Amino acid sequence: MSKGLLHHIEIYVSDIKRTVDFWGWFLEELGYTSFQAWESGQSWKIDDTYIVFVQVEDRYLDIPYHRCRVGLNHLAFHASSRQHVDKMTDELIEKGINILYPKMHPYAGGDNHYAVYFEDPDRIKVELVAPE
């Protein structure tokens, strides 16, 4: 283990089933494996880092998530290549997942930033970026 690397990220979600359906294929395409699953949550792991999604309690559902408020803005993942970004973009479109900034895709992050941007079921922005 390297000092300073993330141990895990835990995100509360509004609908765990939709979240698991959405994130499962994506994370597994990136090399994550299912790590833990229970009635109100699911996690995936890669090396020593894992991502956990947990069903939020009903009493906290009154204020929906918005990435422009204080808190998490987006999660960015490394792709293996530009071709990997293109393949995943095609899969996202096939699944009916909205690609953000379509007029600027795949350079929405700038001229040397080849990536696809999209949203999960709770509208958390996700980025898959190719190496430069």
Image (cartoon, grey):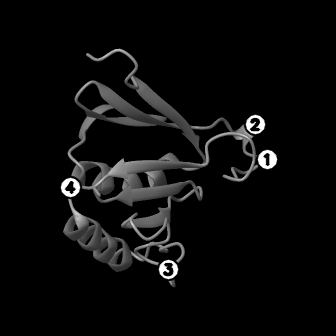
The spot of residue 66 in percent (x, y) is 70, 53
Distance CA(mark 4)–CA(mark 3): 21 Å
Mark 2 or mark 4: name the one nearer the start of the chain: 2
Camera-nearest label, 1 or 3: 3
Tell me which residue sits at (35%, 31%) in the image: 50
Q: Residue at x 20, y 70 (%)?
A: 83
| Residue 20 rendering spot, x and y as whole percentages | 40, 49
The reply to whether the C-beta atoms of the residues labelled 1 and 2 are less than 8 Å apart is yes
Report the Cα–Cα distance between label 2 and label 4.
Answer: 40 Å
Looking at the rendered structure, the secondary structure element under dot 4 is loop
Q: Are marks 3 and 2 in contact (CB under 8 Å)?
A: no
Q: Is residue 94 above or below residue 37?
A: below
The residue that label 3 is drawn on is 104
Q: Which residue is mark 4?
A: 80
The residue under the point 37% across, 24% down is 5
- Give the structural element (helix, strand or loop) at label 2: helix
Q: CA distance from mark 1 to mark 2?
A: 7 Å
Residue depth check, mark 4 versus mark 1: number of the one nearer the observer: 4
- Looking at marks 4 and 1 on the same chain, the residue that comes earlier in the sequence is marked by 1
Dot 2 alpha-carbon crowd within 10 angstroms: few under 14, some 14 to 19, many 20 or more: few
Above/below status of 122 relative to 9: below
In the rendered image, which residue does mark 2 sit on?
A: 59
User: Which amino acid is tagged 2?
Assistant: Arg
Q: For numbered disc 3, what is the local secondary structure?
A: loop
Look at the picture and state if 57 lies above or below 20: above
Q: Amino acid at mark 4?
A: Ser
Q: Nearer the viewer, residue 93 or 117?
A: 117
Q: Is label 2 or label 4 in front?
A: 4
- Which label was assigned to residue 62? 1
| Residue 103 vs residue 45, the one in the foreground | 103
Q: Quadrant of residue 52?
A: top left
